[in-house]
């Protein structure tokens, strides 16, 4: 297996359609997706994976499968996508972990590794965005060295979300 990134406790690799059932444990879980318009159907999980496969071809990155080294368990996804925020296009670090693996620092560890990956490829600035009341994701962004920039409105899964918050990190400052 070819891993894109390895950290002390995690390995990140490209998603494949064989990951659909494991990724559905995150993206189809109502608690995990409470900050999204709705939990994903199986078809939406497959579409998510295909979108990322397209991103790998188009950009050389996307959201990757996150594997815990000790157990070799698929615990979620994390990576870099291109996201439109108002009039600007940004490299964005996103992350989704199975609920039983949250609160252990895995999202922060993966997000930091993705920041390093982006910086090593000449990316000058990265963002993360989330709903304003998504405190766990906000804390991950802050632990990844990002700072709050602004609140904004974005259409997510066809629904207008007015309470998104943008965090940003200048990779040249590190």
Image (cartoon, helix red, strand yellow):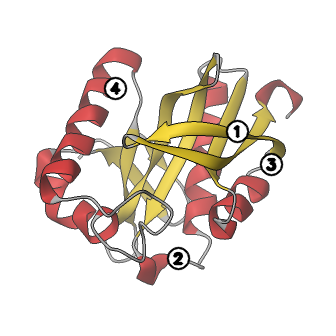
Mark 1 or mark 4, earlier in chain = 4
Asked whether disc 1 touches disc 3, contact meaning CB atoms under 8 Å apart, the reply is no
**Residue occupying image coordinates x 65% and y 47%:** 164
**Please, what secondary structure does the residue beneath circle 1 have?**
strand
Q: State how far apart marks 1 and 3 are (Cα).
A: 20 Å
Q: Earlier in the sequence, mark 2 or mark 1?
A: 2
Mark 2–mark 1 Cα distance, whole angstroms, equals 26 Å
Could you tell me which secondary element the residue under label 2 belongs to? loop
- Reading the image, the residue beneath label 4 is 55
| Cα distance between the residues tagged 4 and 2 | 26 Å
Q: Does residue 46 appear in this view?
A: yes
Front position in the image: 42 or 153:
153
Labels 2 and 3: the sequence-earlier one: 2
Q: Which residue is mark 2?
A: 102
Rendering coords of residue 96 (x, y %): 45, 60
Camera-side mark, 2 or 1: 1
User: Which residue is at 69% across, 58% downward?
Assistant: 132
Q: Residue 5: where, in percent of width, then height? A: 47, 44
Q: Hey, which quadrant is residue 71 in on the image? A: bottom left
Looking at the rendering, which quadrant does residue 53 occupy?
top left
Instruction: In the rendered structure, find residue 145 and report the number of the disc placed on it.
Output: 3
Sequence-wise first label, 1 or 3 = 3
Q: Which residue is mark 1?
A: 152
Location of the C terminus (image quadrant): top right
The part of the image, by quadrant, that contains residue 72 is bottom left
Q: What secondary structure is marked by label 3? A: loop
Nearer mark to the viewer, of 1 and 3:
1
* Foreground residue among 5 and 137: 137
Quick one: 166 or 161, which is closer to the camera? 161
- Residue 27 lies, in percent from the top left, at 32, 62
């Amino acid at each position: 297996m070819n891993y894109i990134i390895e950290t002390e406790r995690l390995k990140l690799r490209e998603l494949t359609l064989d990951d659909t059932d494991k990724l559905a444990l995150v993206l189809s879980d109502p608690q995990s997706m409470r900050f999204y318009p709705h939990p994903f159907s199986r078809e939406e999980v497959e579409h998510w994976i295909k979108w990322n496969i397209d991103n790998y071809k188009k950009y050389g990155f996307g959201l990757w499968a996150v594997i815990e080294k000790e157990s070799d368990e698929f615990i979620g996804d994390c990576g870099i996508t291109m996201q439109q925020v108002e009039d600007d296009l940004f490299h964005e670090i996103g992350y989704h972990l199975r609920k039983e693996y949250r609160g252990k620092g895995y999202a922060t560890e993966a997000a930091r590794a993705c920041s390093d990956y982006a910086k090593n490829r000449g990316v000058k600035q990265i963002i993360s965005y989330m709903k304003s009341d998504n405190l766990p994701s906000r804390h991950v962004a802050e632990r990844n060295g990002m700072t709050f920039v602004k609140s904004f409105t974005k259409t997510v899964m066809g629904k207008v979300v007015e309470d998104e918050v943008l965090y940003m990190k200048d990779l040249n400052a590190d």
